[in-house]
Image (tube, grey):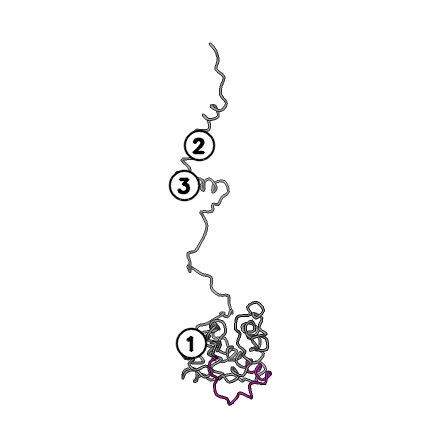
Amino acid sequence: MRNTPTNPVTSRGRWMRPLVAALALTTLAGCKPLDDGMVAIFGRSMRDQRSFDPYENTRPAPEHSVAFAAGNFPTADGVVNLGQPEGVAIPPFTQFDLGVPGVGGPTIQGLVNPTDPTSAQSLARGEELYLRFCVVCHGPDGVGANAYVAAKHPLLPAYNVSGANVAAYSDAYIYAMIRVGRGLMPEYGSRITHYDRWHVVNYVRQLQRQAGTLQAQADAPAPAPDADGGDE
């Protein structure tokens, strides 16, 4: 009888079929058998780990830490509110309450600057915030043409906060614009806190004094909006 040579491919296929079947069963059964094998070999599995659902057993704040923000207004300038009753009553208002440029509606007119506008500490804080938030559009000297954004966007009107128009604005109105914005200016109330807005107002007055516009416009009536709509 003639012997038929064995086909190595066919022979390999015979012993691979059980392996494929075992892998298929493992796949159909999910990863649990594989995890059990990993636990048996290594003593651990990725499925067996401690985890928390959102907001479950959250880690408390470190001892003696101070929250970055609190829901209540501070009791005084430079004080962080740690849950005590609010120290100031700030009426809510929107851009509709800004009313006449430079004056504002009754709610705006009722705001009073609680800081010392000549305080060196207030002016230093106001300068810090002005250079952080305002200088890009209003310039380091309060002249819009010198603003950092002017070179990139020459057609974007930047208002002169050191000019005669803003020098005639009330402190309350400038504070209100910082808080809710107006025209092209966005609101900064979510980024600059209550007392810090007044510090910015004080620093803007300092820029106006340096420009020589504050005294000249101290008793002048509020200016009318510009014809091109650039008034803030």
Q: How far apart are marks 2 and 1 (CA)?
A: 71 Å
204 vs 103, left or right, is: right
Q: Is mark 1 on a helix, strand or loop?
A: helix
Nearer to me, 38 or 106: 106
Q: Which residue lies furthest to the top in this view?
A: 1
Residue assigned mark 3: 30
- SS class, disc 3: loop
Picture quadrant where residue 214 is located: bottom right
> Callout 1, which amino acid?
Gln
Q: Residue 20 carries which label?
A: 2
Label 1 – label 3 distance at C-alpha = 60 Å
- Closer to the camera, 221 or 188? 221
- Give the residue displayed 47% in from the left and 61% down from the top: 59
Q: Give coordinates of residue 164: x percent, y percent.
A: 54, 83
For label 1, the residue is 95
- Say which amino acid is labelled 2: Val
Element on which disc 2 rests: helix
Q: Residues within 10 Å of mark 3 (few under 14, many from 20)?
A: few
Q: Which of 128 and 231 is in front in this view?
A: 231
The dominant secondary structure in magenta is loop
Number of disc labels: 3
- Residue 127 percent location from the top left of the image: 57, 77
Which residue in the rendered view is the most extreme toward the bottom? 219
